[in-house]
Amino acid sequence: MSTMRSAEGGAPLGGEHRSRESHGPTATRSAEGGAAPGGEHRSRESHGPTAMRSAEGGAALGGEQRSRASDGPTTIEAGYNFGYLDENTKRMIRRALLKAVAIPGHQVPFGSREMPLPYGWGTGGIQVTASVIGPQDRLKVIDQGADDTTNAVSIRRFFAKVAGVATTEHTAEATIIQTRHRIPEVKLREGQILVYQVPMPEPLFRLEPRVSETKRMHALADYGLMHVKLYEDIARHGHIAISYNYPVMVGGRYLMSPSPIPAFDNPKMHRMPALQLFGAGREKRIYAVPPYTSVHSLDFEDHPFQPIRANAACALCGARDSYLDEVVTDDQGGRMFVCSDTDYCNTRQGSREAAE
Amino acid sequence: MKTLHEAGPIPTSAPSDAPVIGPPAIHTQGLGKTFTLHLQGSTRIPVLRDVELAVAPGECVALSGPSGAGKSTLMRCLYGNYAAGEGRILLRHRGQEIDLVTADPRLVREIRRETLGYVSQFLRVIPRVPTLDIVAEPLRARGMPAEEARARAAALLARLNLPASLHSLPPATFSGGEQQRVNLARGFAPHYPVLLLDEPTASLDAANRDVVVALIAEAKAKGAAIIGIFHDAEVRDRVADRLFHVSPMQAAA
Amino acid sequence: MAMQTSHTPAHPHPAGGSAVTPPPVGEGRGGGVAATDAPLLEAQGLTLRYGPITALDDVGIEIFPGEVVAIVGESGSGKSTLLRVLSGLQRPEAGTVTYRAPDGGAADIHRMGEAAMRRLHRTDWGFVHQNPRDGLRMGVSAGGNIGERLMATGARHYGSIRDAATEWLRRVEIDPARIDMLPRQFSGGMQQRLQIARTLVTHPRLVFMDEPTGGLDVSVQARLLDLIRELVADLGLAVLLVTHDIAAARLLAHRLLVMRHGSVVEQGLTDRVLDDPQHEYTQLLVASVLAA
């Protein structure tokens, strides 16, 4: 495991990615716990989750500054174009983005490039970020809500290197937030851009295997099949058993995959003042939700959409309104719930300490 | 083909092409029928030629002639089951005279639903449909509510001595006589203005023959024009006002 | 299916003792359709060739509300192609297909946008395939299969969708307790009945059926035919049925078209065409069948 850890330094995202995929968002923290080496477990026991997080960050990043304070602009590493991608590629992606914004929820194909990390680790999101970022931007990157996981830290460091932009962990300070599987708890505002990393952009993917047919279904807004899936859920489980990647209708027209964010985050997409951009690198698709666009989670009148949240308060900040991760704290089955959004949690903890 | 009317025990009426009492409910003009058997070297079998038959409301005409003369073919032509090759079959339907030979299939269906009834010798059984519904079906097709239609069907079946215990069963397993009575009930229930009867009493006992004779008399009294083939001379003499002779034609190759 | 006792279909002998068919399907219960109604579907001059083979040669057809029309013919006669062209699934080289909507507006099927066509196919029209696998979603429960058309047309109340599915399972004689089972757990006959329920749940006005009893055991066929007969009569559906089964056509259809080599060689009332076939090919077709 220690070799794997050190390997992570080179390949930014490590093996935990796959375990997250299989467990879904609520389980992710504990999955991390499971994947973590024995030694780190012990350190968690002694130091608690916050310590663990910083330990993780430290292990993964080595030299990167660990302070929560924002980092100012740096210089671009020699030999790279601004934002890593060449200008023509960025232009091509921007054209796709413009089209995507013009047709909210519609998937626009784009020429996804090889990136210095494998598909599935955020190549789509990085290409979108690289195409919209400017020298004045301040970038925040989160992975499952956390600023300090390998994925988040590496992508942040990547852009500091190739775009020389300032980075931050504070949601409110950021102009661009690239995210994997979460929407920050703090309300986003106009002028901000939220870039989602998307593994599978096609919401009908599991229901209709033919791409030609799903395209036709989108073109004709023929979405009865999606409701059939929800019907089947209720028939089988008594409720709609989709806890993440919960399908939405955008602008009353296009069925869209919100990427694997928890259903809890779905309502935040509705009429969000910030621009939401979605990039799927492997599937070569870009889509968008412009500011103040209606985003409705599919449901039935008698089985309305219900965002799911663990019925607990955050063990660190006491929040009862945030999305919680379950963290395994020891080998005896001890567990605790903490905010998934580290910035939100830390800010709350900080203000509580200040009040004391 | 010559059309004759037989001299016999029945008082003969005027020749069939002569005016009858009131306008006829059905009459034919130059009706002819020839079968062409394409599978047998296009053999042509002429069966009917120049048939001039007119039947007035309230009149019952019995077709006579030897077996194979074309009586059944004429009946089937009159029902539109066989395509008449020549001539016209004029029928009063919804107050208008309509030529059945040239009427389109949808109009023929409508005529069969409202004006023209046919009781064949054999019942075509529809799988799983109870006897009562088979009899009530033509009534329901005319828009009668289900309950009323079933009640009338049940009454008629009872009159034809078909036990109520059989009404809910499909008639597939019934005896020939029972099936014949189901067929008769189905044909008499709607009170068609024109009714074609092909050997309606063939497999019935004396008591049921009497019922059929009474039903025919009642239909006539209600103004129905009836054309029948009756091999049972006694029944024929009791119901027919006159005979219409159908004579065999020579088969020409 | 039960047959009359004697019949001589190929040789309509003058003294033949066979019975005349009663109208096969209730004549549209609740009062008949006036003969002057405009046709629901009307096709003219349909022509289509596959290379040297003429699949359709100047074919015309009309279907009126509540009317059941069967197209019979052997394999390769063009009857399935005609069904596909009439239902908009395939474009003819020449000719038009006009559908008259409930509001009276007429639309040329092959000039219609795909969106309008799909809407038609999930509301006013239904299509029953020969192979239930082509018409069902095999990975979706019976209830979901029936509910799909409802949901596609905007039904958003789970309880009512489920009630409708339960009711339709009952109507097609499938135990409603099996509502959550997958079609692959059903027999072939049940799958076909499920496909019919799935198609009829939105009360279409016109249903296309392509050999609906093909591939089923004879005893299962009889039950299915009877079920179709009942439903068609109760709902007053117009049906365009393609079949090579003369007995099925006799039981279900009001009117019959006989096709050969892409042409309609004979048409008319079902009992007239079958009992007194005029065309050489129709005589051959009727003669090839046992008592129909």
Image: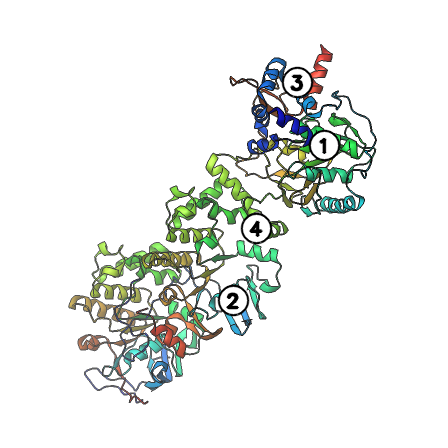
Judging from the image, what secondary structure is the residue with disc 1 in? helix
Q: Amino acid at mark 2?
A: Pro
The residue that appears at 36% across and 73% down in the rendered structure is C286
Q: Are marks 4 and 1 in contact (CB under 8 Å)?
A: no
- Of the residues under marks 4 and 3, which one precedes in the sequence? 3
Residue B24 visible? The answer is no
Q: CA distance from mark 2 to mark 1?
A: 66 Å
Establish whether labels 2 and 3 are both on one chain.
Answer: no
Q: Residue under label 3, please give it.
A: A50
Numbered disc in front, either 2 or 3: 3
Quadrant location, the N terminus of chain C: bottom left
Image position of B208 (left or right of B94)? left
Near mark 2 (Cα within 10 A), the count class, few <14, some 14-19 or many ≥20, is: some
Letter of the chain that mark 2 sits on in the rendering: C
Q: Nearer the viewer, mark 4 or mark 2?
A: 4
Horizontal side of B56 relative to C122 (left or right) equals: left
Q: Position of residue B216 (x, y in %)?
A: 26, 70
Residue located beneath label 1 in the image: A155
The C terminus of chain C lies in which quarter of the figure? bottom left
Q: Which residue lies under the disc numbered 2?
A: C39
Q: How many angstroms separate mark 4 from mark 2 (CA)?
A: 37 Å
